[in-house]
């Protein structure tokens, strides 16, 4: 029997669906996404569904862009830190403990200097900085 590490609190305070797209066009980020020019800048939009979050509790969503360089080192670019409190009206489909489902959408801008492999790393924490969940999306930017 193989043992796999599981997230703690599997059904509490998680990100269930993350969609990342190009802010201006609304199209989703693909594994290989084309851009008009390199170097350049872009606005990405992330839509995040949250699972069993508590209303009136402070959360933080941290977005980082990580690029792999040709020498296999990594560059990390902080994109956004979003502190949020879900209001009572924005938390739906409540569980027995009062937690429920919610959605958030945010934009982040970044500049890229070359084509290559990137990833967006989202970290969802509580007000004390304890990580509740994380999400990775890998993609490659290539010039059209």
Image: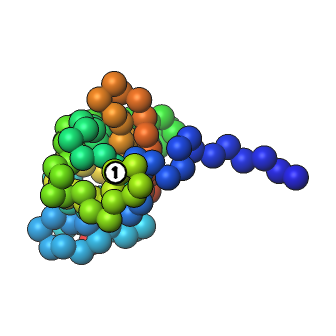
Q: In which quarter of the image is the C terminus?
A: bottom left
Query: Residue at the left extreme?
Result: 24
Query: x, y (%) of residue 71?
Result: 50, 38
Instruction: Give the side of residue 101 with respect to residue 36, left or right.
Output: right
Residue at 39 percent across and 57 percent down: it is 95
- In depth, the one of 66 and 130 nearer the eye is 130
Is residue 113 shown to the viewer in this render?
no
State the SS at label 1.
Answer: loop
Q: Residue furthest right?
A: 1
Give the camera-side residue of 72 and 27. 27
Name the residue located 15 percent from the left edge and 58 percent from the top edge: 89
Q: Position of residue 117 (x, y in %)?
A: 42, 53
* Mark 1 burial class by Cα count in 10 Å: few <14, some 14-19, many 20+: some
The quarter of the picture where residue 34 lies is bottom left
Decide if residue 59 is in sight here.
yes
Q: Does residue 131 appear left or right of residue 109 in this picture? A: right
Q: How many labels does the image show?
A: 1
Q: Residue at x 33, y 60 (%)?
A: 94
- Position of residue 10 in the picture relative to residue 60 (left or right): right
Q: Where is residue 112 in the image (x, y as percent from the top left)?
A: 24, 48
Q: Which of 103 and 89 is in front in this view?
A: 89
> Residue visible at 20% across and 38% down?
83
Residue at the front extreme, as displayed = 96
Q: Vertically, is 122 above or below 19?
A: above
Q: x and y percent of residue 78 in the render?
A: 27, 36
Residue beneath label 1, please?
Answer: 98
3 left or right, relative to 111? right
Q: Which colour scheme is used?
A: rainbow
């Amino acid at each position: 029997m193989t043992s796999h590490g599981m997230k703690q609190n599997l059904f509490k305070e998680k990100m269930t669906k993350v969609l990342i797209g190009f802010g201006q066009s609304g199209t989703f980020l693909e594994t290989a996404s084309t851009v008009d020019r390199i170097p350049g800048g872009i606005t990405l939009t992330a839509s995040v569904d949250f699972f069993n979050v508590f209303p009136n509790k402070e959360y933080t969503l941290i977005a980082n862009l990580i690029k792999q360089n040709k020498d296999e080192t990594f560059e990390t670019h902080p994109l956004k830190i979003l502190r949020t409190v879900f209001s009572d009206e924005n938390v739906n489909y409540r569980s027995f403990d009062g937690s429920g489902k919610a959605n958030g959408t945010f934009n982040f801008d970044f500049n890229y200097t070359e084509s290559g492999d990137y990833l967006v790393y989202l970290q969802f924490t509580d007000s004390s900085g304890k990580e509740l969940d994380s999400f990775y999306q890998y993609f490659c930017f290539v010039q059209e």
